[in-house]
């Protein structure tokens, strides 16, 4: 069974940086495309950044210029580099990865990011 795992969350002060990682647990699967989502308390889950099979990227307006999504096909890992973090970036961050030749969607369990002074 495919399991997607996020890592790299934590607590940071405003202006700080974190890098999230998304990969499969156990067997290595390629992740041709993926998206990072976040959900803050009392709010709907929203798309933060996405990367396509061709490497094209897309970002929510609120994170443009501060977040960078990338992938390492050899490692089967997708990253979200988050710089200049703000308190409003506080949320649980989820990875939705397309996996396998049929590019089925799998969600991770989420990782908490807290930005606070």
Image: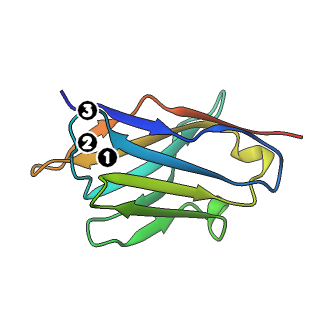
- Which residue, given by chain and number where applicable, does mark 1 sit on? 97
- Which residue, given by chain and number where applicable, does mark 2 sit on? 105
Q: Position of residue 117 (x, y in %)?
A: 89, 40
In terms of image quadrants, where is residue 109?
A: top left
Q: Position of residue 46 (x, y in %)?
A: 52, 45
For marks 3 and 1 on the same chain, the one whose residue lies earlier in the sequence: 3
Residue at (22% x, 43% y) in the render? 28
Residues at circles 2 and 3 in contact by the CB criterion of under 8 Å: no
Circle 1 packing at 10 Å, graded few (<14), some (14-19), many (20+), is many
In terms of image quadrants, where is residue 60?
A: bottom right
Residues at circles 3 and 1 in contact by the CB criterion of under 8 Å: no
Helix or strand or loop: what does disc 1 sit on?
A: strand
Front disc: 3 or 1 = 3
For marks 2 and 1 on the same chain, the one whose residue lies earlier in the sequence: 1
Give me the C-alpha separation between circle 2 and circle 3: 17 Å
Q: Position of residue 107 (x, y in %)?
A: 35, 35
Residue at (14% x, 48% y) in the render? 100
- Which residue, given by chain and number where applicable, does mark 3 sit on? 26
Give me the C-alpha separation between circle 3 and circle 1: 15 Å
Report the label total: 3
Q: Quadrant of the N terminus?
A: top left
């Amino acid at each position: 069974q495919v399991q997607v795992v996020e890592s790299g969350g934590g607590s940071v002060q405003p202006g700080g940086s974190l890098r999230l990682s998304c990969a499969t647990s156990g067997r290595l699967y390629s992740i041709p495309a993926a998206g990072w989502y976040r959900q803050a308390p009392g709010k709907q889950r929203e798309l933060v950044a996405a990367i396509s099979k061709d490497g094209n990227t897309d970002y929510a307006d609120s994170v443009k210029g501060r977040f960078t999504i990338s992938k390492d096909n050899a490692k089967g890992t997708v990253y979200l580099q988050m710089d200049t973090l703000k308190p409003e970036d506080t949320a649980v961050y989820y990875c939705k990865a397309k996996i396998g030749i049929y590019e089925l969607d799998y969600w991770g369990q989420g990782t908490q990011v807290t930005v606070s002074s």
